[in-house]
Every structure is written in structure tokens, then in C-alpha cells.
Image (cartoon, helix red, strand yellow):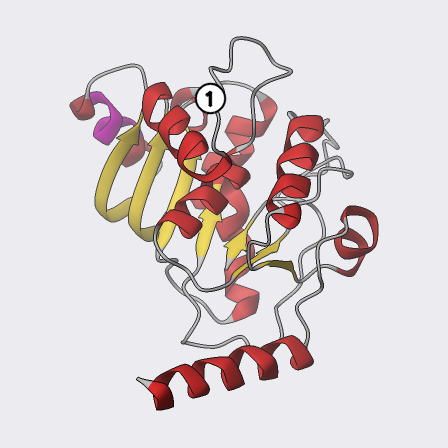
Amino acid sequence: MVVGSAPVSTVPAGFGSQFHVITVNGSQSILDKWGVDVPDATFMQFNQVEGQTTNALHVRKVLDGKRTRLLYVVRWPKSLDLLQQGLAAFNYSYDHVKVINRFKRMAMYEAVMGDLNVEIDDNMKFSNGLTAVFYAILSGAKVVIISGINPDSSGHVYNDANLKRLHAGTDKQILQVLIDRGYSLYTADHDVAKNSGLPLWTDEALSKFNAMNADASFRA
């Protein structure tokens, strides 16, 4: 389950302890409503740690005092010690912290998409939400469900600044490729399913998934 920061997100059908939850930047702020205390993993853009933009300031505010199990900070340019100090400054804790540099992101993209994306300009860059999707796929997830990841929306769930969503065009293209290649990728959000072509995760989809797993276990 990959939870992004779009203003609208939906608890997926059948949600419970069997789901692994990945959050992106400040999207962790909604998990109290989902009954989740600590996500399994979090992807955070480096600028959220020390940046002074409206978005970065709000991300730190909503994450103050929270915790994740595994934190990935994307493209952090300084030392690990300075990263840990920056995280401690807004009381954000973790079991483990790792840095994903540009080359690791490129490798994740290539492993899933089959070609190279060097991100030399804004038109080629993709969001951390899609980075989290790649991570889930490469970690062996049988199904990946996204919620709060909507390239057609603006704004973020944790503030009312209504900031433009970056990399929306590239994200839409990537999602379409993943659909065309038959990845088990769903959305829990009705509007995203309607506009993107992603299948909607429903009780029926959950039942089919459970039946397939039960059949696979029986044959094994």
C-alpha cells in the first residue's frame, strides 16, 4: 500500500495488518485515521528535511514526533550525520535510515521500466510516489495499491496552499506503462481509476487476490 499526499485518499478494501504501508513525505499524517501508528517504510525528498519552502515547512510540522520503520531519504546531498541531525530537529525517528541517491533511483527505474531515465530536466523527473511504487514492485509485492497519488490533482493533504503537483506528466506516462505491461497495480481512489485507467481496488479484487493466493498455496 503506497500512500501519497494528494488531498483525497481512500482506505483500500480489506485494509488490515496484512498490508505493508509505504508513505511519501507528509502523507503519514493521515494514517491515524487508518488505524496505523507506524508505516513500514517512508520515502522523503531531501528538501523536506531542511528546506524553507511552504511544502517543506508543512511536512516537518505534520511529521513532528512521528516515526517510521525504514526511512529512505531521496537525493540527500550531505553526510549521514547531518541528515540524522536534521531529522532529530523535528523529532522524526526511525528504525533504520538510508539515502537513495540519483543513481539508485535510475537503477530502480531501469529495473522496472526497462530503459534509462537520467532525469536531466524536469520533464523527465518522476515523483517520490512513483519511486515508492518501484520499490514495492522490486521488493516482490504481489499487488501494489496506491492511494493519494493523483497526477491530475493539485495541493497536498497536509496544507491548504494548493501547490501545483510536480512531475505529473511523467507520472501519468509511467503509470500507463505499468498498466500496459500487466503489473498488479491498483488504486483505491475512484477519481484516479476513472481518469488514469488504473483498476480500482475493490472487495471483488481482494476476493480474487485471496483466491489466487489460496490456490497457489494449495498447489505448493
142 vs 89, nearest the viewer: 142
Residue drawn where x is 61% and y is 69% of the image: 12
Residue drawn where x is 36% and y is 57% of the image: 140
Tell me the residue that label 1 is attached to: 116
Residue stretch in magenta? 82-86
- Taking the magenta stretch, the answer to whether it contains residue 97 is no
- Taking the magenta stretch, the answer to whether it contains residue 84 is yes
Residue 105: % across, % down: 39, 28
- Screen quadrant of the C terminus: bottom left
Q: Which secondary structure lies at badge 1?
A: loop
- Please give left or right for residue 133 compared with residue 168 in the image: left
**Residue most extreme to the bottom:** 218
**Residue most extreme to the front:** 219
Residue 39: % across, % down: 39, 58
Residue drawn where x is 64% and y is 42% of the image: 175
Secondary structure of the magenta portion, mostly?
Answer: helix
* Residue 28 position (above or below residue 172): below
**Residue most extreme to the top:** 120
